[in-house]
Amino acid sequence: MKYNSPYEIGVGDVVIMTDKTGYKTEHLVLINYIKNETDAKGYTPPSNRTILIDNYGVYLQKEEDL
Protein backbone atom coordinates (compact mmCIF):
# COMPACT_ATOMS: atom_id res chain seq x y z
CA MET A 1 0.00 0.00 0.00
CA LYS A 2 1.22 3.48 -0.84
CA TYR A 3 0.64 5.94 1.97
CA ASN A 4 -0.45 9.34 0.73
CA SER A 5 -0.64 11.08 4.09
CA PRO A 6 0.76 10.68 7.63
CA TYR A 7 -2.87 10.33 8.76
CA GLU A 8 -3.00 6.93 7.02
CA ILE A 9 -0.07 5.50 9.02
CA GLY A 10 -0.67 4.13 12.51
CA VAL A 11 1.61 2.91 15.29
CA GLY A 12 2.14 -0.83 14.82
CA ASP A 13 1.62 -0.74 11.05
CA VAL A 14 4.14 -2.52 8.88
CA VAL A 15 5.29 -0.35 5.98
CA ILE A 16 7.33 -1.50 3.00
CA MET A 17 10.06 0.80 1.75
CA THR A 18 11.75 0.41 -1.63
CA ASP A 19 15.27 1.72 -2.15
CA LYS A 20 16.72 3.11 -5.41
CA THR A 21 17.73 -0.38 -6.58
CA GLY A 22 14.21 -1.79 -6.07
CA TYR A 23 15.07 -3.73 -2.91
CA LYS A 24 12.10 -3.82 -0.51
CA THR A 25 12.32 -3.88 3.28
CA GLU A 26 9.61 -4.06 5.93
CA HIS A 27 9.60 -1.66 8.87
CA LEU A 28 7.38 -1.39 11.93
CA VAL A 29 5.97 2.06 12.77
CA LEU A 30 7.16 2.91 16.28
CA ILE A 31 6.07 6.57 16.46
CA ASN A 32 4.04 8.68 14.05
CA TYR A 33 3.94 12.39 14.87
CA ILE A 34 1.69 14.64 12.82
CA LYS A 35 2.49 18.34 12.50
CA ASN A 36 0.60 20.57 14.94
CA GLU A 37 -1.32 17.68 16.58
CA THR A 38 -0.79 17.35 20.33
CA ASP A 39 -0.27 13.85 21.74
CA ALA A 40 -1.49 12.51 25.11
CA LYS A 41 1.59 13.83 26.93
CA GLY A 42 1.24 17.35 25.53
CA TYR A 43 3.94 17.21 22.82
CA THR A 44 3.13 19.09 19.62
CA PRO A 45 5.64 18.37 16.82
CA PRO A 46 6.61 21.23 14.47
CA SER A 47 6.74 18.84 11.48
CA ASN A 48 5.57 15.35 10.44
CA ARG A 49 7.91 12.66 11.72
CA THR A 50 7.65 8.89 11.54
CA ILE A 51 10.10 6.68 13.42
CA LEU A 52 10.47 3.14 12.09
CA ILE A 53 12.28 0.01 13.24
CA ASP A 54 13.44 -2.77 10.93
CA ASN A 55 13.85 -6.50 11.58
CA TYR A 56 17.35 -5.93 12.93
CA GLY A 57 16.34 -3.32 15.52
CA VAL A 58 17.70 -0.40 13.53
CA TYR A 59 15.79 2.85 13.88
CA LEU A 60 14.98 5.00 10.88
CA GLN A 61 13.43 8.41 10.83
CA LYS A 62 11.50 9.46 7.76
CA GLU A 63 10.07 12.89 7.22
CA GLU A 64 9.15 12.39 3.57
CA ASP A 65 6.71 9.95 2.02
CA LEU A 66 6.83 6.23 2.87
Image (spheres, rainbow, N blue to C red):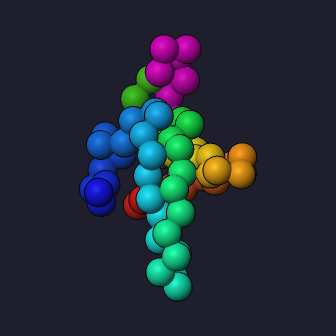
Q: Give the residue at the far front of this rendering.
A: 55
Residue 16's place in the image compared with 53, above or below, is below
Q: Main secondary structure of the magenta part?
A: loop
52 within the magenta span: no
Residue 15 percent coordinates (x, y): 44, 52
Q: Where's the C terminus, which quadrant?
A: bottom left
Q: Residue at coordinates 71% horizontally, 51% vertically from top-left?
A: 56
Relative side of 36 to 55, left or right: left
Q: Give the residue at the far right of this rendering.
A: 57
Residue 7's place in the image compared with 56, above or below, is above
Residue 50 percent coordinates (x, y): 51, 45
Whether residue 64 is visible, yes or no, is no
Residue 18's place in the image compared with 15, above or below, is below
Residue 17 percent coordinates (x, y): 47, 64
Residue 48's place in the image compared with 40, above or below, is below
For this rendering, which residue is in front, 36 or 61? 61
Residue 60 percent coordinates (x, y): 64, 53
Whether residue 56 is visible, yes or no, is yes
For this rendering, which residue is in front, 39 or 44? 39
Relative side of 35 to 59, left or right: left
Q: Residue at coordinates 72% horizontally, 46% vertically from top-left?
A: 57
Highlighted magenta segment, given as a residue range: 39-47
